[in-house]
Image: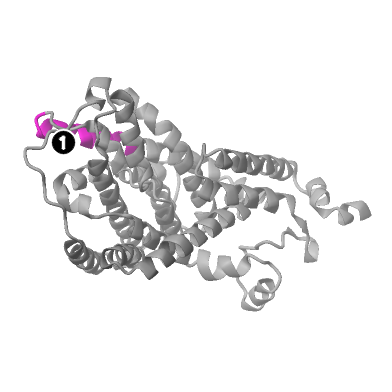
Amino acid sequence: MDLLYLFQGIGTLCVQEPKIAIGRIVLMLIGMVLVFLGAKKILEPLVMIPMGFGMAAVNAGMLFLTAGKIGNLVIDPLVTETTALVSILQIDFLQPIYTFAFSNNLIACIVFMGIGVLCDVGYVMKYPFTCMLIALFAELGTIATYPIAIAMGLTPGQAAAAAIVGGADGPMVLFSSMMLAPEIFVPITVIAYLYLSLCYGGYPYIIRLLIPKEHRGIKIKTSAKKNDVTSQEKLIFSVIACTVLCLLLPAAAPLLLSFFLGVAIKESGVTSYMNMIETTFLYAATFFLGLMLGVLCDAATILNPTILPLLILGVIALGLSAVGGIIGGYLIYFVNRKNFNPTIGIAGVSCVPSTAKIAQHEVSAVKKSTIILQYAMGANICGVMTSAILTGIYVTVIPMLGK
């Protein structure tokens, strides 16, 4: 027993339930694999490398705490009593970040602000009907997964949080789960970010399955070149859209404010703020987001019985959203008398700019001279806004159902 206390990482494995001990070992290995795949750029390195390190370290670094409790000195998300929390803040090095930035959605808002700085809403303004229609169809997973989750026995809040995975927007999943189902926000957010990396490997196959080569290579013919949208027009759009959407959906106001503020800073040309948000805030928030997700992946949490339905629902939501987006692309194809490339539909799934790049890559593989990126980015950015709107609707409506 003295040896178990001397090497407590190994000792805790020996005294825990076999499924927890095995789960810890498996998660350590998964963490190592995530780091490797991130370094190889097979998965998104900005999230996967810190997440993999965190996942491996938190499951390896368990020790015996007071009263026979097993835990770690990285973070203890179960502490709620004020005195104990202050004590933990002095010991667990990531607890202050968890308490003051992660669990209150600050990190999600900072990431959204960074996305706003990177986005060009001019594409949405040049092709509003096309972008909005595709974005709406690409929310099929967000809408259709909710009743499926209810049928599987999840509560309305948990079902809504799982459905938001279909929007393929990690900060949105974090935000909605903290608001609606905080008891599952750790596993649902981890699942969302893992799937967002993995689905980029699967989406090209969905495109190839549903869209023939001759349609993937379609060039869009334009009768007249549209004038570029000016920065002033984009600024006006961002201010009005932010105000109107916050007025209609105040529950999503933090995310809407963050996104449109980022857009406004970019269009105002305030380079000092742009550099600060893009190079410091966004990368710092993304780094700590990945690291926090990793250290929250202790075996006891991940082996919760609710994980299996969440894994299934995540696949369903992202798959349905991809199919819905392609259906929207085909609808525009027929409305425009076949003068449209339906591959653009996949870009309505809102992870900026990954799905837009997937669409362009699949088109270029068939015909290198076909450029659809401007349409794809418009649908992509509109998907972000649509996802925020649906999140606001869920966050507003779901609590009313329980009254």
Residue furthest bottom as drawn:
83
Query: Eyeballing the image, is 35 above or below 252?
Result: above
Q: Secondary structure at mark 1?
A: helix
Query: Eyeballing the image, is 298 above or below 359?
Result: below
Query: Eyeballing the image, is 359 above or below 258?
Result: above
Horizontal side of residue 200 vs 298, given as left or right: left
**Number of marks:** 1
Looking at the image, which is closer to me, 247 or 394?
A: 247
Q: Quadrant of residue 354?
A: top left
Is residue 137 visible from the viewing direction of this image?
Answer: no
Q: Disc 1 designates what residue?
A: 332
Looking at the image, which is closer to me, 163 or 17?
A: 163
Horizontal side of residue 348 vs 93, given as left or right: left
Is residue 39 visible from the viewing direction of this image?
Answer: yes
In which quadrant is the C terminus drawn? bottom left
The residue under the point 72% across, 59% down is 71
Q: Where is residue 262 shown, x and y percent of the image?
A: 33, 64
The colour scheme is: one colour
Q: Where is residue 333 shown, x and y percent of the image?
A: 16, 32
Q: Quadrant of residue 397?
A: bottom left
Q: In the rendered structure, which amino acid carries the disc numbered 1?
A: Ile
The residue under the point 16% across, 56% down is 229
Q: Where is residue 337 shown, x and y percent of the image?
A: 9, 30
The residue under the point 35% across, 56% down is 118
Residue 327 colored magenta? yes
Horizontal side of residue 99 vs 209, given as left or right: right
Looking at the image, which is closer to me, 268 or 211?
A: 268
Main SS of residues in magenta: helix
Residue furthest right as drawn:
2
What stretch of residues is rendered in magenta? 320-337
Q: Where is residue 341 shown, x and y percent of the image?
A: 21, 32
Horizontal side of residue 196 vs 136, given as left or right: right
